[in-house]
Amino acid sequence: MTKSQTTGKGMSPMNHQTCQPEPDAGTRRRSTHVSFTGASQANADTGSFGAAADLLPADLLDNDEIVIFAVKPSLWMIVFLSFRWLAAMGVVIVMAVECRQQLAWVNPKTVVHVAAALGAVRVGLAMLQWASKLYVLTNRRILRLSGIFNIDLFECPLVRVQNTYITFAWYERLVQLGTISFATAGTAGIEASWINVNNPLEVHERVRSAIHRAQKNGSL
């Protein structure tokens, strides 16, 4: 894995995380109801990066907040999440077929059907995990939405972002993806990550630019 660092200044209930510490708690969580009514407030120059902005709950934005871009992880995420399970099911199928004489009590056809069904369930779950993720950059905050049944929202003002990291796992490098992580002021480590992002260098540069602008202007 390679890493580079940049230093800069029907829906279920939602778990809400923010990097702004409260007096008695490092991380704040609350339940809230959001409606996906669309939030097409992306700038005209966002191009393909703005396509996912319609998936952002409109009531998460302040009146003067502008979506710079919203992106989803690459569809390769489904493959990455499912690969180990599918490989294990493949091994089970091969063993059932090859050892059918030694294991006379095992019905290879039944094993194949069960393994294929379990593999399909895992792929379906991975598709739901992919569909539930959304990464958003506004002129004020970074956001990450995830979760299938309980929606988890992480948000952090740009002025509090201390460091950004871009990493390339070996399997991400094969398909030109990357992961962008964020560390904030007052914390010892990474608080949130955008994983399996397409065009990671371009996305990272746009995030850096927004952070620098926000911190320069002292915006919240």
Image (cartoon, helix red, strand yellow):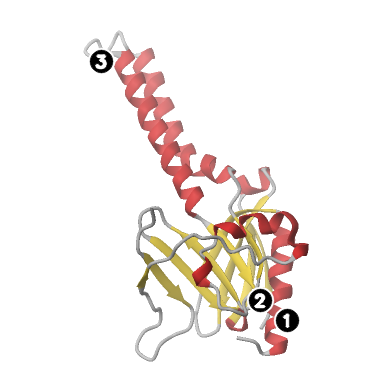
Image quadrant for the N terminus?
bottom right
101 relative to 75, above or below: above
Q: Nearer the viewer, residue 70 or 186?
A: 70
Report x, y in % for residue 152: 42, 64
Q: Residue furthest front?
A: 37
Q: Residue furthest left?
A: 105
Q: Judge the density around disc 3: few (<14), some (14-19), many (≥20) Cα neighbours within 10 Å.
A: some
Asked if the residues shown at circle 3 and circle 1 are in contact, with their CB atoms under 8 angstroms apart, the answer is no
Kindly report the distance in space between the C-alpha atoms of the residues bearing marks 3 and 1: 65 Å
Type of the residue with mark 2 = Asn
Q: Which residue is mark 1?
A: 213
Q: Which residue is mark 2?
A: 139
Q: Residue at x 70, y 75 (%)?
A: 210
Q: Residue at x 42, y 56 (%)?
A: 147
Helix, strand or loop under label 2: loop
State whether residue 175 appears in this view.
Answer: yes
